[in-house]
Every structure is written in C-alpha cells, then in structure tokens.
Amino acid sequence: MRRLASAAVLTGLMTSPAAAAELNLTVEIPRLSVAEYHNPYVAIWVETPDQTAVKTLAVWYDFKLKNQEGETWLKDMRQWWRRAGRAMDLPADGISGATKAPGRHQVKFVGGKAPLGTLPAGQYNLVVEAAREVGGREMVRIPFQWPPKAPATGHAKGSSELGAVALTLKP
Amino acid sequence: MKTLLRPLCAAAALTAMLAAPMAAHAHRQWLLPSMTVLSGTDPWITVDAAVSNDLFIFEHVPMRLDGLVITGPDGAAVTHQNAATGKYRTTFDVQLSKPGTYRIASVGDGVMASYKLGGEQKRWRGAPADLATAIPAGATEVKITHSQRRIETFATAGEPTTESLKPTGQGLELAPVTHPNDLFAGETAQFRLLLDGEPAAGVEVAVIRGGGRYRNEPGEMTLTTAADGLLEITWPEPGMYWMEAELRGGKSSIEGAERMAVYVGTLEVLPE
C-alpha cells in the first residue's frame, strides 16, 4: 500500500505541472511627455476568437478612492466594459488592482487558480486595453492556445497608450 | 400706406398659415444626453432639449418639458432635476440611481384643426381633450389632424436592461433588437419600428450623424423598414446620431382625425 500510495503521489507530482499551466504577461506602460499625466486604467482579459470575454484577469484602476469614485471611468475601457466589465461586481478580489506607473509590469496567472481558473481547451486571445484620463485609449490582442502543450510566446505592441506586451505560456 | 399694408399683412398671414404645417419638417427636435454608457455608483447625466436645423446645435428654440417622461430600469417613472430653459435650449439632469437602462422621452399628443366659419378660414391647436369644445357649431370643412410624437434617448448605468424599453403601444416607437446603448461603429444594429405596438412596414427613416456644421456633406442616410418593421442601420462612424420617422395614417383615437405619428431618437455610437 505504501508503495502504491507513493507511486500515486509521484504520478500526481508528475502530472500536476500540466494542471498548473502558467500564463505570464509583461505589460509596458509607456512614459509620455504630456502636460497632465495620470496612470492609465488597464483591463486584461481572455476572450474567445468571436470576442466573447471568458475571464477578466486584472483591472488596474483607482479602486481605493472614497465612494468607489474610481469606477466612474471604468467605462472608458470601452471594449472591456462592453464585453465583461458592465456585468461584473467591482472591486473583485484578485482582479482589482491599483494603477501602474510607466514601466514594465509582470503579472502571472496560473491555470486552475483564480482569476484564470479553468479554461476549456481551445483558441483564445489575451486582450489588454488601456484608457488614460485626458489621454487616449488603446487595445492590443495576442492569440494563444490553451492549455499550452509546449512553452510558447506571443507579442503585441501598442503605439500610443501601451508599449510592448509579451505573453509567455508555460505548460 | 394703409392700403398697402393690408394686403401685405394678409399675404404674410397666409404664408405663415401655409408654413405652419411645414415647421415640423423644417426643424429637428432632439434630446442630447451628455453620456449614454456609464459606470460607477449613482452616475448622473445631463440632457439638452432643443429644436434646431443643425444637429446638435442650439440655434432655434428650446424644447418644452411638459411631455417629459423618464422611465427607470424597473419601469417606474423617474423625475428629472435641475431643469432650466434658456434662449435656445432646455437642460435637465437625470440621476441613474439604479443600475440599468433609462428611457428619456418627450411625448406629445396634439390636435390641429382647420375649419370654415362664416366663410372665414380658422385654425386651432390644442390637446385632444379640448377638441370637443374648440370647434364651434356651424363650422364647415372641418379637418382634424392628430399628431403623436415621441422624441427620446437612452442611457445605461452598468449592464443594459430592457424593462424601460417596453413599447407603450401608442404612436410610433422603436423596439430594440440591438440594445440602444450597445452601438458600435462598423456594426449593424437592428430595431423594430412599431405603430401602436404593431410592426410598421415600409416606413422611411432618416438617420443623421451630429456635427454637420463641420462637414460639407449632410451625410443623411435614408432607410426603409422591412415587412416586419425591421430597421437595420450600419453605423459608418462613431458619433451621436439622430433618427426620425414619420407616418401619416393609421387609426387615430380621435374620431374623423387624420393621424400623424413622429418618432425621433438620439443614439450614441461608440468606436470599436
């Protein structure tokens, strides 16, 4: 029994990485030379190829303002608001986060764990949308396959409100 | 001078009379919401209400608010706030204190009557309820026009809902297939035009994007509803759009009256 059990544990260990595939993302917020600068609001979500949102992974906004005043501008991330945001209760644990200053920001999402959770096997897009107060709005998409069978990468580059966005998948 | 003035006055009066029924065509009535898609808690919008030629420019007369009907997401009436009327426009605020879709409408029900009395042509305008006492006995060539108008717009806090969009069954209305606060450039929206709650087929609808003052082309689209009243609009660009449909005929609730029903909607189309 003991041997069998340890074999099961071992098998479990060997298979567990597959169950905990990782999605690593680097989002660059460009430094802009403007008279009035505010960090952008950013939404990161997963959609199916027909643009149906399936998981919101992160929303960076002024979520600590009194009376949830920061939510007033969530609708400026127009696509995310339309596809997911307007149906969500915010702030949401593990999704709502503070705005980020210009620079590269790394975020990691793990299969089976919130907010990514479980995704049925298939083709998806990772979408990053940024909207800045008294500034512009930009959205980029990176297609990916889930779950990843082998390490994979994807890239997109914004031209105004977003810099380089890089996606790395670990099986 | 006296002899000269009189014919001039008569001519002017005649021109005014002839022009009066055209006035409804010559000017556009509209409600212009400050925003149509909102997030956050208890957001507010402000709405301008005016009559003008250019969209959406304040250049003719303000709209009167006596027919204002605001319906909240639960179907209950909502009261407007901070109303003020200036030279060219009326403005009022609406607090979207419940999540969902609000329908903001100026609804009018009026009667125009023309008749002859003692060989003189007479005209009367008023409410349907006053019609019975308005036309004196002995009037001949009585012509009654019953005009029903609905001028409306929509705003949504959070997720769009449809309770407030339920047709009233009175006059011309727009029943959503596509939600009126979920419109994006490049996409095709579908609505159903209804007359007294029934599909209105073959009705011409004018659709114009605001901001014509900064364009040389008016850019007016003329569309026609299908047999089932279905209207399909492919939005060429983002912007605030004005649409109007007008229909003569159909059964009037006033006996012997010709009915004229007008629908005007202001719809916001967002960039993809």
Image (cartoon, coloured by chain):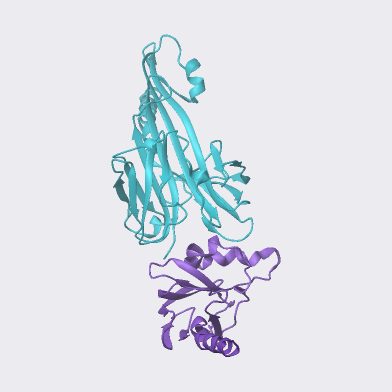
Chain colours: A purple, B cyan
Quarter occupied by residue B64: top right
The front one of B120 and B100 is B100
Residue B177 visible here: yes
The N terminus of chain B, quarter of image: top left
The front one of A171 and B87 is A171
Query: Considering only vertical position in the picture, is A84 above or below A105?
Result: above
Quarter occupied by residue B194: top left
Give x and y (percent) for residue B151: 46, 42
The front one of A144 and B133 is A144
Horizontal side of residue B173 vs B93, given as left or right = left
The C terminus of chain B, quarter of image: bottom left
Q: Total label count?
A: 0
Give x and y (percent) for residue B57: 46, 52
Give x and y (percent) for residue A24: 51, 84
- The residue that appears at 52% across and 84% down in the rendered structure is A16
Residue extending farthest to the top is: B138
The front one of B109 and B170 is B170
